[in-house]
Image (tube, rainbow, N blue to C red):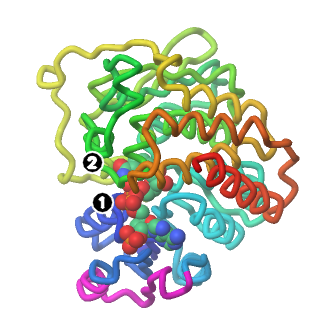
Amino acid sequence: MRGVAVLGSTGSIGCSTLAVLRRHPDRFRLIALTGGANGARLAEQTREWEPRYSALAADDGGGASCLIEAACRPDVDIVVNAVVGFAGLEATLAALRAGKRVALANKESLVAAGELVERARVEGGGQLVPVDSEHSAILQCLTERPSPVSRIILTASGGPFREWPADRVAAATVTQALNHPTWRMGAKITVDSATLANKALEVIEGHFLFGVPYQSIEVVVHPQSVVHGFVEFEDGSVLAQLGFPSMELPILYALTYPERLPDGGVRRFDPVVAGPLTFEPVRVDVFRAFALGVAAGRAGGTAPAVFNAANEVAVARFLEGRLPFGRIAEVIDAVLGRHRIEPVRDLEAVKAADRWARAAAEKEAG
Ligand code: NDP
Ligand code: MG
């Protein structure tokens, strides 16, 4: 029996995690739940699961203290971090320092502070296991294969605007951006998937998770979302992981890694039903947030934290109807252009860069 804390239980990944846990009561005990502002859903979850701890971050003034409290409990072995955005960072650090396994959906943790997350993992003896489907695919291809990797390829659905002309993309509405072709997710990551900022976040996430240099991480658009990732080994051989799109499989794997559990909850793969699988390059000229994010990752230091913060502000503005879709990448570009990159020495340096970038993005967005 392993004790599990679910941070962000009221969200999309949080609810999928509970669906997985519901099927495996003999293996996992749900110890702690945290939500953001959705008190009604948290109350419902608390009634069903009777966890030893449950809290709403909004009651905490939006701070990370309830996340840290839930994550660091002695009866918790695995922390599923399904919080969206920079708000999840401190809980990731605290859980790793406390020696927990972190099943990480909150990719923003790694993007903003990859070096600090790695340091916390080494110092605390914790374990970092990705929930993100592409990174779960890479991990599944790598596990128990000690051979050096020469390249990893992440797949991207291409989002709802994959085939749209540039001028139409720039004027896309919130409803159009939230209409993702293959995945049902929270609003922020759905917009990130439409701008392809999400794929840049995932390139940075992959760099820190697997220690692969940026020049060895590629992205290919794959509209069917059936192949989740490829790994190429030194001899040129390539392995891939496949499945119909569902986050429950990568969540389950992050809980049981490196083992697998029999599980009847996920739709079985059928290659004939999947049909033709196609691959195409990213339209980097149209989806500029992608190239900006990858460049920020390569630049290193505080640049990825600034990319992340500017993106969070621009996406929030877009969702409020206060920024055109096409301006999201422009805001990020302007903020990165004004940033003087610093090394990521400690959490304070990352928080300072995050604060600076948020203020700069607000100003830039007007
Ligand atoms: P949702 O918006 O659906 O859920 C986010 C969760 O975080 C909710 O429980 C929300 O609470 C909580 N939350 C929001 N702000 C705060 C805060 N300041 N402090 C504490 N908790 C907060 O997002 P998703 O589940 O879609 O995504 C979660 C993470 O997983 C993101 O990092 C995303 O990139 C990643 N991810 C998601 C995938 C998906 O399929 N959804 C796939 C791969 C990665 P409340 O709703 O109660 O306000
Ligand atoms: Mg992903």
Q: Which mark is residue 184?
A: 2
Residue plotted at (27% across, 16% down): 277
Label 2 neighbour load within 10 Å: few <14, some 14-19, many 20+: some
- Whether the residue under disc 1 has CB within 8 Å of ligand 1: yes
Kindly indicate the quadrant of the structure image that contains residue 16: bottom left
Residue 25 in the image: x percent, y percent?
28, 73
| Element carrying mark 1 | helix
Compared with 120, 263 (above or below) is: above
Left or right of residue 357: residue 325: left
| Observer-nearest of 218 and 237 | 218
Residue 123 percent location from the top left of the image: 79, 63
Question: Mark 1 — residue?
Answer: 16
**Left or right: 253 as drawn, with respect to 289:** left
- Foreground residue, 228 or 170? 170
Q: Which numbered disc, 2 or 1, marks the residue that appears first in the sequence?
A: 1
Highlighted magenta segment, given as a residue range: 43-61
262 in magenta: no
71 above or below 251?
below
Horizontal arrangement in the rendering, residue 121 relative to residue 39 (left or right)? right
Q: At which x and y percent is residue 365?
A: 58, 47
Q: Amino acid at mark 2?
A: Arg
Residue labelled 2 has its Cβ within 8 Å of some atom of ligand 1: yes
On screen, 228 above or below 52?
A: above
Total marks placed: 2
Measuring 21% from the left and 48% from the top, which residue is drawn there?
266
Q: Secondary structure at mark 2?
A: loop
What residue is rendered at 62% in x and 39% in y? Answer: 332
Between 89 and 209, which is closer to the camera in this rendering? 89
| Amino acid type, residue under disc 1 in the picture | Ser
- The CA span between labels 2 and 1 is 11 Å
